[in-house]
Image (spheres, rainbow, N blue to C red):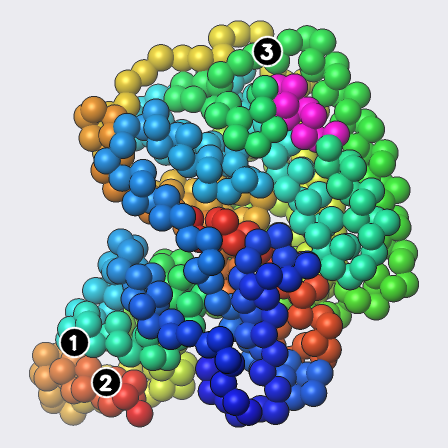
Amino acid sequence: MKKTVDISLPVGPMHPCFKEPCRIKCETRGEYVLSAEVELGYVKKGIERIMRGRPWQEVMFLAERVCGICSVIHNFVFIESVEKISGIVPTERAAYLRVIVNELDRMQSHLLANYSYCYTIEHETLAMYLLNLRETVMDQLELITGARVTCAYIVPGGVRSDLRPDDADTLRAALDHIDAELSRFVRIFETGPLIALRSKGIGILTKEAAIESHAVGPTARASGIDNDQRSTHPTYKALGFSPIIRQEADNYARIMVRFEEVFQSTGLIRSALAAMKEGPIRGGGTIKAGSIRYRGEAPRGELLYELTTDDYGRILEIAIQTPSIPNIQVCSHAMLIDAQSAADITSIFISSDPCIACTER
Amino acid sequence: MNRYLYEKDLRQMKLIILESRRHDAAVMELAATLGIKRQQLRKILIERSDMMFLENLPARCDAARETGDDTERLLGIPLLTQAFHLLSREEGVSVREQYLQRIQSGTTLEGALLEAQMEILEMIKR
């Protein structure tokens, strides 16, 4: 980076507001941010290389370990990729169960992201409320899959375990509780004068800049871009899914899109529970040789798996493009530029929900 | 302003990013369009771009491949202006116009393409 300014301000790699290590190198003139560069390489896993040459049964577990926050979607997209290659179709009940677990994962990820944001702008009360509510979601995830983080719930042709009738009732009650509590928290967020001061008009990402840097997920949708891979997924289509879009393009919009998506997820889960009929949860099939580029909608945006398999079910080639990669780039090259205060650097960065584990896969 | 005390050389890290499969395919595609070696393009990218920009290269290339007309795609203008950011949009328009002018003035397609490639390389090195 060229040194043309009076202050070079490094933020991180270890910072109280960051969940994971990365360094933002900012060039500032006083408080005004002129440019920013995100430096990575502190937690590189090399997981794509570990996956290469291994059978799908092993890669399935490795895929979940790309990210500890959105592990279900990695499992979801990887399994659907090998299913598409092999012509395997999941049973109807399993398809709905996949949506339920995926939406629970999205809810906990969004609540964690918004917790991080509230913590960053030092609204710890709301942050702790959100973190507490996330535990309710995590309990439901554990109830259905048997695990909180690395669930390995989705398998080719179906899912690993069924939802019992009393578990469905517990889930419905939890969804009602989440809706009621979250409505209260959203009201606090919407009406808080200090929250507005730190969020509205801060970290503007124009639609043009978002398109140019290929921003995805809530970051793009908060800038008015209609981009959600769930719109093209057959099960979501059957549930009448339509993406949530806002136009404000600031920190506030990004957080509100996530809040609204949590409400949307509870609605989708209720619809899936209503539409789900009794039936088998696992079908049959054998993994075949082939190549595919397959996309899914992770909590942070579009997740791409590009893989090649052989007749023995081994993964010969794999490349994973996680949503945090474009989102962090757009954050450093568009959102952070022209920030009026150095205090906004962390809040703008966190508002894009960066996941370093995903980026350093 | 002094340099960071703990500033490290990121060239090796950037090279590792560019060596991955999807990045390599993107670099190979543009290098072939420009008629230069992959290593030369990698060197330019490492000097000019930060790590996140390089990490996001395949996604931007995917988006850029869907834009532009046939002439622009032949010259690699969508990739150069939108994905690699080696040319500005104005420079891209100028290269395209000059290429079309050369063809209208009687230059062969191959000759015009070669001249356009030379012009792009000069712009990049500037």
- Give the letter of the chain under mark 3: A
In this view, A133 is above or below B92: above
> Relative to A245, is A69 on the left or the right?
left
Decide: few, some or many residues near mark 1? Use Cα within 10 Å; few <14, some 14-19, many ≥20: some
Residue sitting at the far front: B5
In this view, A83 is above or below B125: above
Image coordinates for residue A198, horizontal then vertical, percent: 79, 67
Is the magenta region chiefly helix, strand or loop?
helix
Circle 2/circle 3 CB separation < 8 Å: no
Task: Name the amino acid type tagged 3.
Answer: Lys
Decide: few, some or many residues near mark 3? Use Cα within 10 Å; few <14, some 14-19, many ≥20: few
Please name whichever residue, A75 or A14, is drawn nearer the observer in this view of the structure. Answer: A14
Task: Name the amino acid type tagged 1.
Answer: Ile
Is A227 contained in the magenta span? no
Residue at image position (29%, 56%) is B20
Q: Residue B7 carries which label?
A: none
- Sequence-first disc among 2 and 1: 1
Identify the residue position indicated by label 1 in the image.
Answer: B36
Residue at image position (61%, 70%) is A11
Quadrant containing the C terminus of chain B in the rendered view: bottom left
Circle 3/circle 1 CB separation < 8 Å: no
- Name the secondary structure under disc 1: loop
Write down the quadrant of residue A169 in the picture.
top right
Identify the residue position indicated by label 2 in the image.
Answer: B121
Please name whichever residue, A252 or A65, is drawn nearer the observer in this view of the structure. Answer: A65
Q: Nearer the viewer, mark 3 or mark 1?
A: 1
- The answer to whether tags 2 and 3 share a subunit is no
